[in-house]
């Protein structure tokens, strides 16, 4: 079965940084579900890059072995 681990992340970044983070999150081998994603402009509208701030609520899932996983295994051979 899977164990659920919730995370709540507050961030402040520029748009390209946020895209890189989300791309890395999508590339994880762990199952990750984003429950909430809030983003808003936070910096000066006249700045070269628009600064963003927001919050991401997500859950990561980790598989734990169970007794059912042992049923199909062959006994280990001893020399």
Image (tube, rainbow, N blue to C red):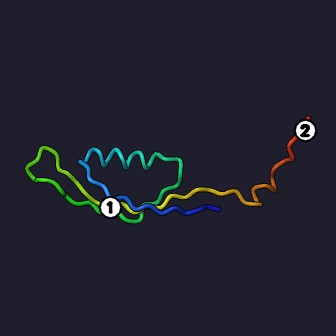
Given the current orientation, which residue lies at the most extreme left position? 46
Count of marks, rendered view: 2
Label 1: which residue?
A: 55
- Give 69 or 42, whichever is nearer the viewer: 42
Q: Residue at x 30, y 63 (%)?
A: 38
Q: Are the residues flagged by discs 1 and 2 in contact, CB closer than 8 Å?
A: no
Is label 1 in a helix, a strand or a loop? Answer: strand
**Which quarter of the picture shows residue 34?**
bottom left
Question: Which quarter of the figure is the N terminus placed in?
Answer: bottom right
Given the current orientation, which residue lies at the most extreme bottom position? 36
Residue 36 percent across, percent down from the top left: 37, 65
Q: Mark 1 and mark 2: span between their CA atoms?
A: 53 Å
Q: Residue at x 12, y 44 (%)?
A: 48
Query: How busy is the neighbourhood of tag 1: few (under 14 within 10 Å), some, or many (20 plus)?
Result: some
Mark 1 or mark 2: whose residue is earlier in sequence: 1
**Which quarter of the picture shows residue 76?**
top right
Q: Residue at x 37, y 50 (%)?
A: 22
| Marker disc for residue 78 | 2
Residue 37 percent across, percent down from the top left: 34, 62
Query: How busy is the neighbourhood of tag 2: few (under 14 within 10 Å), some, or many (20 plus)?
Result: few
Q: Residue at x 8, y 50 (%)?
A: 46
Question: Which quarter of the figure is the C terminus placed in?
Answer: top right
| Marker disc for residue 26 | none
Residue 65 percent across, percent down from the top left: 70, 56
Position of 42 relative to 16 (above/below): below
Residue 2 percent across, percent down from the top left: 61, 61
- Give 24 or 54, whichever is nearer the viewer: 54
Left or right of residue 23, residue 49 in this image:
left
Is label 2 in a helix, a strand or a loop? Answer: loop
Position of 51 relative to 4 (above/below): above
Given the current orientation, which residue lies at the most extreme top position? 79
């Amino acid at each position: 079965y899977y164990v659920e681990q919730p995370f709540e992340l507050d961030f402040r970044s520029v748009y390209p940084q946020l895209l890189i983070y989300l791309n890395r999150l999508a590339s994880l081998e762990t199952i990750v579900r984003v429950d909430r994603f809030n983003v808003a402009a936070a910096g000066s509208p006249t700045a070269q890059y628009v600064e963003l701030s927001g919050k991401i609520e997500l859950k990561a899932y980790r598989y734990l072995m169970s007794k059912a996983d042992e049923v199909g295994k062959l006994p280990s051979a001893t020399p």
